[in-house]
Amino acid sequence: MIRFSKHRIFLVGYMGSGKSSVGAALAKQLDFLHLDTDISISELEGATINEIFESRGEAYFREREHNLFKFINEIDKVVVSTGGGFPIHNMLMPQLLSSGLTIFLDTKLQDILVRLENNPNTRPLLYQSTEDRKDFIRNHLAERVPIYQQAHISITTNLSVPEVTHNLVAKILSSV
């Protein structure tokens, strides 16, 4: 059995799975700090994630994520809403698993498409026709879900944020 700190919780899942919303609600419920990796990097860089991707490239952004993880790993009582690629790149998923309780927010393709439809933070790669976007996300999910599924806990996000949060708190407390 893998040992981990229950004082550090990482939410993983695809873009639009609700990591930011659930993370904020979960942190409030547990009286933990909430940290969103995309927001943190954006604030540190003084640019949106899309601007960072466009001006500095994905490799630069992934390096920023890795550096942020080193910082996060020193914090206790924190819920971390990771970007969709955070556990994928730089082999971070094994490190997340050993550094905290890792939770996969499992979201259906159709729900992701609806949530990302008018989201101004959607990555440029998703600015395509609806059918192309659907194929892109479907292929991305096929690659990423097996990694996300390594999380200690998986929960579907087809409920409201308060309901998902309530279910997560129950699962977390039952694993203590």
Image: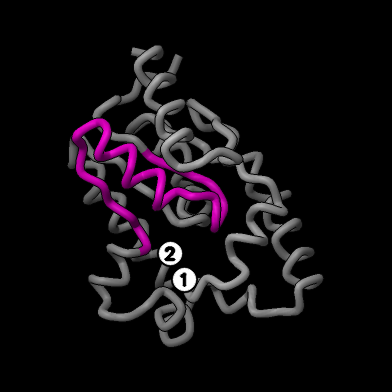
Residue matched to label 2:
62
Q: Where does residue 83 sit, x and y in percent of width and height? A: 45, 56
Q: Which numbered disc covers residue 59? A: 1
Q: SS for tag 2?
A: helix
Badge 2 amino acid: Arg
Residue, x 53% and y 47% (percent of image)? Answer: 13
Is residue 96 placed above or below 137 in the rendered structure? above
Identify the image quadrant of residue 140.
Answer: bottom right
Above or below 31: residue 169: above
Seen at 65% across and 39% down, the residue is 146
Asked whether 119 falls inside the magenta stretch, the response is no
Task: For label 1, count other residues whose C-alpha is less than 10 Å away and answer few (under 14), some (14-19) or many (20+).
Answer: few
Q: Quadrant of the N terminus?
A: top left
Q: Nearer the viewer, residue 116 or 89?
A: 116
Q: Position of residue 63 (x, y in %)?
A: 38, 64
| Pointer 2 with pointer 1, Cβ within 8 A | yes
Instruction: Identify which amino acid the numbered label 1 is placed on.
Output: Ala
